[in-house]
């Protein structure tokens, strides 16, 4: 699995960027480039289970491996969600799980540098490379107009 890195400089304080990235309402907006209607169930506290879903109920199940507001959050993806059921045991899932998605928020002057490191699941690298910059642009727009 290849690790990909994306970043964006946002003219807003870390606390605002953290909130916009993880709040359920703004999460739906900035993640729309991945899939319109994306949402999550769960919380961002260390050790908590969280599901990242699209309107038809498919998605991924994960656990929050680390959470240090407003500096860093690490998502440990454990498997897929299909028809509302978590799959962490199938051969298809075991081929890639666990996979990490880490967000770092660094104060830079009066703004924030958001860094995203993602373990790209085979077959999704091109999609990630095309979509993450669009998603971060949406996050930037949200934060700079709040």
Image: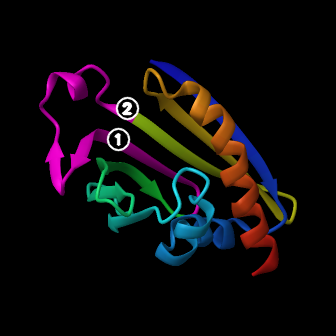
Q: Are marks 2 and 1 in contact (CB under 8 Å)?
A: yes
Which residue is located at x 47 percent, y 29 percent? 119
Which residue is located at x 17 percent, y 37 percent? 88
Task: Spot the residue most to the front.
Answer: 56
Work out which quarter of the rendered image holds the N terminus and state it: top left
Q: Nearer the viewer, residue 13 or 146?
A: 146
Q: Nearer the viewer, residue 49 or 139?
A: 139
State the SS at label 2. Answer: strand
Q: Confirm whether residue 43 shows in the render.
A: no
Q: Which residue is mark 2?
A: 99
Span shown in magenta:
70-99
Mark 2 vs mark 1, CA separation in Å: 6 Å
> Is 89 left, or right, of 49 in this rendering?
left
Q: Earlier in the sequence, mark 2 or mark 1?
A: 1
Pinpoint residue 103: horizontal percent, then vertical percent. Answer: 56, 48
Q: Is residue 8 above or below residue 14?
A: above
State the SS at label 1. Answer: strand
Which residue is located at x 12 percent, y 32 percent? 89
Q: Which residue is mark 1?
A: 76
Magenta stretch contains residue 125: no
Q: Crowding near pointer 1: few (<14 within 10 Å), some, many (20+)?
A: many
Numbered label attached to residue 96: none
- Give residue 47's quadrant in the image: bottom left
- Give residue 41's quadrant in the image: bottom left
Magenta stretch contains residue 97: yes
Work out which quarter of the rendered image holds the C terminus and state it: bottom right
Pinpoint residue 58: horizontal percent, then vertical percent. Answer: 30, 52
Which residue is located at x 84 percent, y 65 percent? 11
Pinpoint residue 62: horizontal percent, then vertical percent. Answer: 29, 48
Q: Crowding near pointer 2: few (<14 within 10 Å), some, many (20+)?
A: some
């Amino acid at each position: 699995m290849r690790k990909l890195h994306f970043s964006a400089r946002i003219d807003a304080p870390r606390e605002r960027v953290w909130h916009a990235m993880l709040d359920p309402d703004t999460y739906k907006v900035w993640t729309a480039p991945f899939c319109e209607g994306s949402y999550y169930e769960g919380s961002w506290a260390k050790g908590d289970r969280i599901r990242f879903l699209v309107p038809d109920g498919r998605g991924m199940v994960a656990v929050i491996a680390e959470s240090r507001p407003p500096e860093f959050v690490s998502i440990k993806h454990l498997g897929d969600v299909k028809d509302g059921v978590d799959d962490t045991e199938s051969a298809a899932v075991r081929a890639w799980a666990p996979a990490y998605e880490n967000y770092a928020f660094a104060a830079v002057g009066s703004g924030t540098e958001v860094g995203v490191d993602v373990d790209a699941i085979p077959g999704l690298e091109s999609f990630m490379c095309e979509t993450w910059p669009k998603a971060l642009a949406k996050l930037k727009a949200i934060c700079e107009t709040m």
